[in-house]
Image (tube, rainbow, N blue to C red):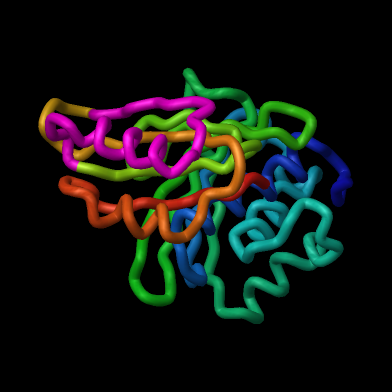
Amino acid sequence: IMIGPSSSHTAGAVRLGRVAWKILGEKAVKAKIMLSGSFAETYKGHGTDKAIIAGIMGMHSDDERIKNALTLAKESGLEFSFELIQLPDAHPNTARISLTGENGAECTVQGCSIGGGNILVTEINGLEVSFTGQYNTLLVLHHDKAGTIAAVTNFMAYSGLNIGNFRLSRPKKGGEAVMTIEVDGEVPDYLIQSLKILPNIINVILIKAI
């Protein structure tokens, strides 16, 4: 169930915006949205601009307010802009979304809409990731130190949470890195808070299945 006209250019675009909003973790007051490929060519006709803004405001893909998202954004104080870019190696339906929150938080999320309303998030704040949003996903930002991955995954195992998919991204040895962990079932709040206090953990973000 979705607001059209396109599952890839509208429904998927809403989900990309929503993931960026989730990662930001607070109300967005500024959004810079860069569109590549087919997104750049057809975004106005397919409502991709409205869809991404709707997601940034926390809407789901079946929300009837999507068609009025640009007006609602302006009324809520969200400043936004669109830029057309070329990403030669990216999926044709790719967006790079940079957000600033009301309390100063910032994030940049890149992802693509791969059809049928499905998405693939490929980059967060310059770090490579790979998740679809179809499963509850933990993003664990950490310092690349020995034993950190084991500490996180062992704690999850002791808590009875099964890992469905795991990916590590580290631009350089010993620097900041991110674990992308898709899990089966619900993730309790206590687990997130417990992971945050483990050694070398910078932050833990839960992206609930969308």
Who's the residue at 79% across and 31% down the image? 116
Q: Which of 72 and 156 is in front in this view?
A: 156
Who's the residue at 34% across and 43% down the image? 140
Position of residue 64 measured from the top left corner of the image (x, y, whole percent): 86, 63
Q: In this view, does 197 lie to the left or right of 70?
A: left
Task: Tell how many labels.
Answer: 0
Residue 40 visible to an observer of this rendering:
no
Q: Nearer the viewer, residue 189 or 1?
A: 189
Who's the residue at 23% across and 43% down the image? 142
Position of residue 3 measured from the top left corner of the image (x, y, whole percent): 86, 51
Q: Which of 160 and 205 is in front in this view?
A: 160
> Within the magenta stretch, is there residue 125?
no
Give above or below for 41 relative to 78: above
Residue 52 visible to an observer of this rendering:
yes
Position of residue 35 measured from the top left corner of the image (x, y, whole percent): 57, 40
Q: Which residue lies furthest to the top in this view?
A: 89
Question: Which portion, as a residue range, is magenta?
Answer: 143-170
Q: In this view, does 130 lie to the left or right of 10?
A: left
Q: Is residue 33 left or right of residue 74?
A: left
Say which quarter of the image contains residue 113: top right
Give above or below for 159 relative to 60: above
> Within the magenta stretch, is there residue 168?
yes
Q: Is residue 5 left or right of residue 20?
A: right
Who's the residue at 61% across and 42% down the image? 185
